[in-house]
Structures are given as structure tokens and as C-alpha cells.
Image: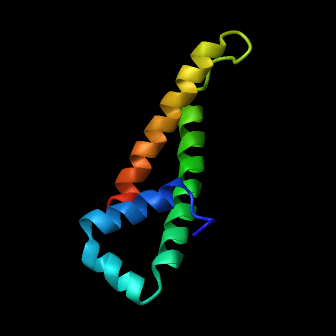
Amino acid sequence: MEQLGKYGFLRRDYLKNHKNSLYQVMLLKDTIGEHLLEVDKAAREREEVILKQLEEKEPLPDKEADQMAWVRAANQHRAIAEEIILKELIYV
């Protein structure tokens, strides 16, 4: 569990709170750790793909010219990617 990242913990919490019977079965079969690691890895890979697509569609402003605009745009891209991941991989 020490290798588990943000998305793995979010998935675990979702299963515990909303799909408790599935969570308990996975816990008893000792497959929960593997499942959470797979979800976490898939979510991180999906995040990279989404961020690349967003940057192609809406390039980030020049960081040297306007650092605050760059930070706003980067944060917006990350928030969009996270929302997509939550809907596609975590809360299903």
C-alpha cells in the first residue's frame, strides 16, 4: 500500500463508502491491493495523455513572459484531467 498514489486512495475510499460489498469481497480475496495499484497506474497514465491533448488544443502561455498566466492555465488543465479521470476510472 505504500506505493499507492492519490487515485488509488480515492478509489479505495469510493469502494469503502459506496460499493462496500465489492470492497469486502476484494479484501477477503486479497485482491484489493492489486486492484488499487492497477487503477492508480491507469489513472496516472490517462492523466498524462489528457494533459498532452489539452496542451495541444490549448497551449500553455509562455512561462517566462507571464508566470501567473502559465500557472492558471496549467492548474486548469490539471483540474480538467482530474475530473475526467474521476468520472472514467475512480467513481465507477
25 versus 87 height, above or below: below
For residue 89, say whether it is visible. no
Does residue 53 appear left or right of residue 26 in this picture?
Answer: right
52 versus 34 height, above or below: above
Does residue 10 appear left or right of residue 40 in this picture?
Answer: left
Does residue 72 appear left or right of residue 12 in this picture?
Answer: right
Q: Position of residue 54 (x, y in %)?
A: 53, 36
Q: Nearer the viewer, residue 49 or 34?
A: 34
Q: Nearer the viewer, residue 69 or 34?
A: 34
Q: How is the image coloured?
A: rainbow
Q: Position of residue 25 (x, y in %)?
A: 34, 85
Can you say which quadrant of the picture contains the N terminus? bottom right
For image coordinates 27% across by 73% down, the residue present is 20
For residue 24, say whether it is visible. yes
Spot the residue most to the right: 64
For image coordinates 51% across by 57% down, the residue present is 43
For image coordinates 46% across by 36% down, the residue present is 79
Can you say which quadrant of the picture contains the C terminus? bottom left
Q: Position of residue 65 (x, y in %)?
A: 71, 9
For image coordinates 57% across by 63% down, the residue present is 4
Q: Nearer the viewer, residue 8 or 91?
A: 8
Spot the residue most to the top: 65
Q: Nearer the viewer, residue 34 or 58?
A: 34
90 versus 71 height, above or below: below
Q: Position of residue 55 (x, y in %)?
A: 59, 33
Total labels: the figure holds: 0
